[in-house]
Image (cartoon, rainbow, N blue to C red):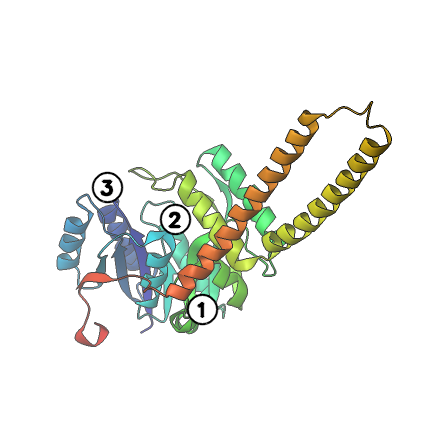
């Protein structure tokens, strides 16, 4: 009997962990009864009652497992690590807040049985904030055109991964993995399934402008060279223009020195304009350097505090 793993990352999801576990178990009993299954929750150091509820769920069903992290390792490391700890013939990554429809799992499994190694859920529309969805669309278009890897638009990681791809993820030695980029770069025999993203069932989203910016910069600095090239070309063009302006100013001053005004305003505008451009590119270069620094330090993806319902050979 083939085994399907469902990996569910969570952080402060006390209102959702019990319903999502029930929904997945009922889905297997109704639609995928011919398969064995495991459900793995990986908790990113929740501060509410999420862990207490996970302990209760795991005590009632030994096929439900849990990993508790010692601290919050971010929105990318924890899910990636969770996928790598699954033991099924394939793994489905699923959000805890019901924005990834559980009813799509049987659809993913059918495509997997048809020979696809990766089945990706692609948001064709969303009931989330319209402005956020629009900004996401702009970001995906931008990064897709800039990246040397063909990025997948509106792919959040929700999907099915064959165990051969999971083994590849386990071999990748990257302390700051970006699963969406890895799928785009190494994913083969991939099938995209469109869906409308519903609203959260309950609770409050933990994504904010900073976390969205962090995600955008991780993909930008990991999969594009455009920022560095812009800094190089922008610096060259700015230097050339500054030299031309300086020569023209010097000549005009020498020829019409008695009629040519000192004109501090143009000078100040030039200084502040070039200064702001320099600060922008210094900040952009800093993003690349932080990315390199994180990889050089090579910290572990996560540090576990506790495991529940794992066999001895899996610990």
Q: Position of residue 85 (x, y in %)?
A: 30, 67
Q: In this view, does 122 lie to the left or right of 71?
A: right
Give residue 302's quadrant in the image.
Answer: bottom left
* The C terminus: image quadrant: bottom left
Residue neighbourhood size for the residue with mark 2, other residues' Cα within 10 Å, grouped as few (<14), some (14–19), many (≥20): some
Q: Where is residue 201 in the image (x, y as percent from the top left)?
A: 32, 39
Give the residue at x 34% y 67%: 84
Q: Mark 1 points at which residue?
A: 113
Report the front residue among 137 and 197: 137
In space, the residues marked 3 and 1 are separated at their CA atoms by: 34 Å
Q: Where is residue 5 in the image (x, y as percent from the top left)?
A: 32, 64
Tag 3, which secondary structure?
loop
Question: Vertically, is 86 above or below 268?
Answer: below
Give the residue at x 18% y 53%: 54
Q: Mark 3 points at which residue?
A: 15
Give the residue at x 31% y 67%: 86
Tag 1, which secondary structure?
helix
Give the residue at x 66% y 49%: 235
Q: Position of residue 268 (x, y in %)?
A: 64, 30
Q: Name the residue under label 2.
A: 101
In primary-sequence order, the first of circles 2 and 3 is 3
């Amino acid at each position: 009997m083939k085994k399907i793993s469902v990996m569910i990352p969570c952080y402060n999801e006390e209102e959702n962990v019990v319903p999502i576990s029930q929904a997945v178990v009922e889905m297997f009993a109704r639609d995928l009864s011919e398969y064995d299954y495991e459900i793995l929750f990986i908790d990113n150091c929740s501060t509410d009652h999420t862990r207490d509820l996970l302990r209760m769920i795991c005590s009632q069903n030994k096929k439900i497992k849990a990993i508790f992290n010692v601290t919050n390792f971010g929105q990318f490391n924890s899910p990636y690590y969770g996928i790598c700890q699954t033991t099924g013939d394939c793994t489905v990554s699923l959000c805890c807040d019901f924005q990834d429809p559980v009813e799509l799992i049987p659809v993913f499994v059918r495509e997997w049985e048809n020979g696809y190694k990766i089945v990706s859920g692609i948001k064709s529309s969303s009931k989330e904030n319209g402005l956020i969805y629009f900004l996401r669309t702009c970001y995906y278009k931008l990064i897709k055109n800039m990246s040397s890897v063909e990025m997948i638009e509106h792919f959040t990681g929700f999907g099915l991964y064959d165990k051969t791809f999971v083994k590849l993820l386990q071999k990748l030695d990257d302390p700051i993995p970006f699963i969406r980029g890895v799928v785009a770069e190494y994913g083969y025999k991939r099938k995209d399934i469109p869906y409308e993203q519903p609203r959260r069932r309950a609770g409050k989203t933990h994504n904010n402008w900073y976390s969205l910016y962090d995600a955008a910069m991780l993909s930008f600095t990991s999969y594009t060279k455009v920022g560095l090239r812009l800094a190089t070309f922008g610096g060259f063009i700015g230097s050339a223009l500054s030299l031309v302006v300086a020569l023209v100013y010097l000549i005009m001053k020498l020829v019409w020195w008695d009629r040519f005004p000192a004109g501090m305003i143009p000078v100040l505008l030039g200084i502040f304009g070039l200064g702001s451009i320099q600060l922008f590119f210094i900040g952009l270069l800093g993003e690349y350097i932080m990315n390199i620094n994180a990889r050089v330090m090579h910290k572990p993806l996560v540090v576990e505090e506790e495991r529940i319902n794992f066999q001895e050979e899996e610990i």
